[in-house]
Amino acid sequence: MSQRYDYRALIGYAQDALAASGLDAGHAEIVAETLVEGDLLGHSTHGLALLPRYLRELAAGHMTKAGEPSVVRDHGASAAWDGKYLPGPVLVRRALAQCTQRARDTGVATVAIGQSHHVACLAAYLKAVTDEGMAAIIASSSPATASVAPFGAVEGIYSPNPIAAGWPTGGDPVLVDISASITTNSLVGERVEEGRRLPGAWMIGPDGTASDDPALLTAEPAGALLPLGGTEYGHKGFALGLIVEMLTAGLAGHGRADAPDQWGASVFVMVVDPEHHGGRAAFERQTGFMAGAARGAKVPDGASAVRLPGERALRLRRQQMAEGVALSDELLARLRKALPDRPLDASR
């Protein structure tokens, strides 16, 4: 079961809770907007579900409450920052704004960020860039997290390592947001809390057996998340995970080699201006053609048409902005537990 809430009321609810915990008012607004955008797009594990943990991080002093990142290097088209464990949404939004502005002059602009706090849902950042006619790639790794096993191993040594990309097509943009592992730590944690199994054998046990038991992640001895592709084709997900490690920790100059002991992220942000390449009109002619060809591809009798990455999310976003954001009863219970003195009203 679920209840619907006006997305603006949810932003205000999260913003007030974060500000009351000491987060800078401007930072609180950005974090709240990003979390609710995740829910609008249907990424429920990386929306308001993160709010209780973010509040605990603020209370423990692990998320920096105010300030700006330090510039480690800046060469115009490329830059590296020390994020000082500021909220990930604040850093990513700032990096995207800088890259979008600079890409208009240089064609491509990047920022690599070390010591960011958690960045929430990567898909939540993409539409603002594609609306500007730009293409973007965002990647994130969590250097203190070791939950995903390399292909052929039974021990977690890296994180799910999401990577997202968005680009305009002349119609709705394509919005890709995938992890290099089959599932995420957040979903595994939710299933453990709810006492439910995973939808598939997405874990690897210490004996090398694939399993749907999410409790393996914290068992003794522990298992691990499988890379994308599982036990048969996980070499592909493992390779993708290594690419994300290179883009994030490698380019930021901060990661697992530093043995960080707190929740955080290394982040890579890139924005590309098609006008500096073949031109925006030519770009959208090609991307629009590919989008149309994919949707029109022949499917088995009675099957639904091909759906592009982000298509369902954008349709859901439009619906929920009009009708209210659906929050599950389980999530509402967790929010009430975390914020007993801050009722969530304005149900639709």
Image (spheres, rainbow, N blue to C red):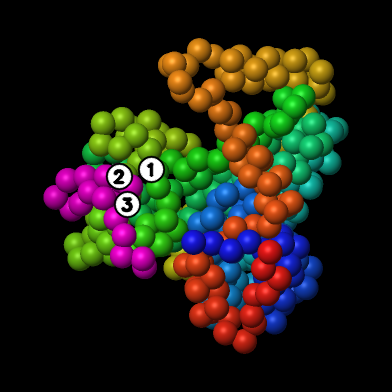
The spot of residue 246 in percent (x, y) is 50, 41
Can residue 246 be seen in this snapshot? no
Residues at circles 3 and 2 in contact by the CB criterion of under 8 Å: yes
Residue 5 to residue 321: above or below: below
Mark positioned earlier in the residue sequence (1 or 2)? 1
Q: Three-letter amino acid code at disc 1?
A: Ile
Reading the image, the residue beneath label 3 is 198
Image check: 240 left or right of 287?
Answer: left
Residues at circles 1 and 2 in contact by the CB criterion of under 8 Å: yes
- Tell whether position 196 is magenta: yes
Mark positioned earlier in the residue sequence (3 or 1)? 1
The spot of residue 123 in percent (x, y) is 62, 45
Q: Which quadrant of the figure has residue 234?
A: top left
State whether the magenta stretch is mostly helix, strand or loop: loop
The spot of residue 230 in percent (x, y) is 30, 37
Badge nearest the viewer, 1 or 2: 2
